[in-house]
Image (spheres, grey):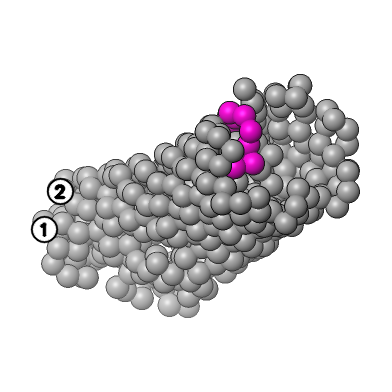
Amino acid sequence: MTTAFFKKSLIAAAVTLASTQTFASAFQLNEHSASGLGRAYAGEAVVADNASVVSRNPAAMTRFDKMALSVAGTYIKPDVDVNGDIYSGSTKFASASESGIAPSAFVPATYFIQPLNDEWAWGVGIFSNYGLSTEYSDNFNAGSIAGNTELLTVNINPNIAYRVNQQFSVGAGLNLVYAEAELNRRAGVLAGLSGNKDTIVSHMKGDDWGYGWNVGTMYEVNENNRFALTYRSQVDLTFKGDYRGTSSGFKTVGGELPLELPAQAEFAGYHRLNQQFATHYSVSWTDWSAFQELKATSGQCNSADGVGVCLHKPEKFKDSTRYSLGGTWYVNPAWEARIGFAYDKTPITQEYRSLSIPDSDRIWYSAGATYHIDKDMSVDFGMAYLDGKKVDVNEKLVENSEALRWKGTSHGNALLASAQFNMKF
């Protein structure tokens, strides 16, 4: 493998914004509240036990008769490993395995609801629906397809709700999303004998604001039984910033990369079976088919994918569905306990699974509790274990060449812990 071949390769095409198997499907986040985590977010759009319901369903704000505030934080400790080798045809070329590719993370959120009268309420949430971080070592042999990737998003979500009648409420809101992204890919074995594996061959960093909307409905059969249906629109981002890599002759140039944060919908139900027990459930859908490729462009780039193309990576995601079921035990006026179970289906097909997207189906096991300090203050605690399926990965080191491929497996799981303070006033 010569340096000349390395310089002709579109190594940058390997970059992607993707999952580390630690959150929801792909790079989606569910970690909006401690109370929700304890029930695996089952029924989250309709339980409405604190102000964090703003993150799922604005219509549920009509259930509040006092101003409400919730502040939450979730700690995520993932454990994601990849084990494999680089092959030239059927011949093993080099080993390329890595442990702990996903760093720990902390996800904060805050919510506020104010009823205006018996019919109207407004509220705002500040939280994140999408994010990720992956970190491979600088000398990783497959560094051209797996380096450092980070995506941070913050959603500022003001909402208003209206109670149509005793049973039916509607709500709507705006989503003001700020996003930052950075990626680095390194030479790895493509550097050849005379090069350095840790040489950065593709770097891009940028940010953007995007805008969307959300709507929600809630139907209350009675005080103990209710349903919700919600929808959150797609948010289109165009990261504008600096690019440097093989396709720009290793010069820093201005570039842009569009990214679609997909639409989401949820159907949820809550049923208080008796004074002590309730069950709740959700079916959530994400329009991941909107995410078909990553393509960064600049007038100063020239790659195998064409003039003006800095990097290109087909993704071909498909829509995904999440199913969750939970239960709440109202132990006494001071304590509540909850459990939850969820099945999270990946949007990634086997053909397009990669080291930077080793995503797989996963199962959630959750538990949590609420302690009521008094009638207007409470604290929530939640924990969850996410068990991801081991999957096979077979990926080209250079998008437009079959010369070298990484073949192996990926497996990931995660522990999540969350705490939350709630107050009515």
Which quadrant holds the C terminus? top right
**Is 101 included in the stretch rendered in magenta?**
no
Q: Position of residue 261 (x, y in %)?
A: 40, 56
Q: Position of residue 291 (x, y in %)?
A: 39, 65
Question: Quick one: which residue is furthest to the left in this view?
Answer: 299
Query: Would you call the spot at circle 2 few (<14 residues within 10 Å), some (14-19), or many (20 or more)?
Result: some
- Residue position for label 2: 253
Query: Would you call the spot at circle 1 few (<14 residues within 10 Å), some (14-19), or many (20 or more)?
Result: few
Residue visible at 46% across and 65% down in the picture: 288
Quarter of the figure with residue 21: bottom right
Q: In the figure, 121 relative to 409: above or below?
A: above
Which quadrant holds the N terminus? bottom left
Quarter of the figure with residue 322: bottom right
Q: Position of residue 125 (x, y in %)?
A: 49, 37
Q: Position of residue 318 (x, y in %)?
A: 48, 71
Residue visible at 88% across and 33% down in the picture: 332
- Residue position for label 1: 299
Residue visible at 56% across and 42% down in the picture: 119
Identify which amino acid the numbered label 2 is placed on: Val
**Is 65 included in the stretch rendered in magenta?**
yes
Identify which amino acid the numbered label 1 is placed on: Gly
Taking the image as shown, residue 342 lies to the left or right of residue 82, namely right
Per the rendered image, the range of residues in magenta is: 62-70
Q: In the figure, 25 relative to 369: above or below?
A: below
What is the number of the mark on residue 405? Answer: none
Q: Is residue 205 visible?
A: no
